[in-house]
Amino acid sequence: MIGCKTLFDGLNRKSGAALILTFIVLVGLTLVAFAFATMINYEIRGTGVGMRNMQAFYIAEAGRAKARWALTEGGESVGWGESDISFGEGTYTVTTVDNGDGTYTITSEGYIPDDINPIARRRVIERNVSIVEINLSLGATATASSTQGVFIAARAIDGNSLTNWKSSVNNGSWLKLNFGSPATFNKLVIDGALINSYVIEYSTNDITYLPVTGLVQSPPWTFTFNPVSAQYLRLSVNGNRPEVDELEAYNTDNILLGQGTFVTSW
């Protein structure tokens, strides 16, 4: 009997040790599983945050693209902007600023879901956006009331200020542009010499000419006026055989934008 009791005591001690070891292993596995689940949860949350930040960035990019379109194709002038515009799962706010040095700055902010309580936001700034006005004269045909030898009318719209048109008479001369179809313009730049006075006129039929209205000269020999849509533009000049090196016509609402420098934040 004593031997059996001793055997049973030994088996109980071994069983107890096995239970303790099993418990420790189960606790360890539970801790590992919990740590792994926590890590996966953080990864999922981090991925979600990254995706929302990326969405906010592209919403801001949409606002910037809208601003460039508005300034070049949408008929808007600098200073234009929009606020709290819905786009996808969020909104954007965009502003445009004239830097005063011939460049613009476009600032666009994207939010998810909005700018009141955003869970994600990004700001995109495009600085030093260059402005390029389109010279309509380069695609026109030029004629003149008179010329001196090789100094024909076409030399006044060839984009080269070293070539020019020269009139063969002192007064009553004119230089005329035919755009081929109706064009809208509101600015004229004259590079020339020996011109004492001028009249800027336009026509839709090359018969009846009307003077432009709202004419303002600033800087010298740069003239802005109320926009007109016409196929013909005529510059009448008086002077001692006046000459025009370049005659440039523009629509200041029709511009091209260069690429600026980009900054992102938030």
Image (cartoon, helix red, strand yellow):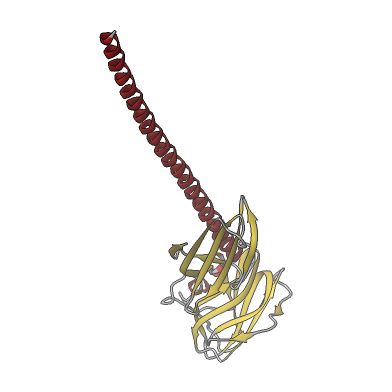
**In the figure, is residue 131 to the left or right of 229?**
left
Using the rendered image of the protein, determine whether residue 138 is visible from the camera's viewpoint.
no
Is any part of residue 11 visible from this angle?
Answer: yes
Q: Position of residue 190 (x, y in %)?
A: 53, 81
Depth check, front residue: 98 or 134: 98
In the rendered structure, the answer to whether residue 251 lies left or right of residue 214 reads left
Image location (x, y in percent) of residue 117: 60, 60
From this view, report whether residue 19 is shown above or below residue 240. Answer: above
Instruction: Judge from the rendering whether residue 100 lies leftward or rightward of residue 235; answer left or right.
Output: left
Above or below 133: residue 243: below
**To which quarter of the image does residue 200 belong?**
bottom right
Residue 255 in percent (x, y) is at 55, 67
- For image coordinates 63% across by 65% down, the residue present is 82
Number of numbered tags placed on the structure image: 0
Q: Report the front residue among 183 and 51.
A: 51
- Residue that lies at the very extreme toward the front in this rendered image: 1
Q: Nearer the viewer, residue 213 or 75?
A: 75
Q: Tell me which corner region of the image, top left, top right, bottom left or bottom right, holds residue 6.
A: top left
Q: Is residue 220 above or below residue 181?
A: below
Q: Quadrant of the N terminus?
A: top left
Q: Is residue 259 above or below residue 167?
A: above
The image position of residue 105, as x and y in percent, is 50, 70
Residue at horizontal 53 percent and vertical 57 percent from the top: 61
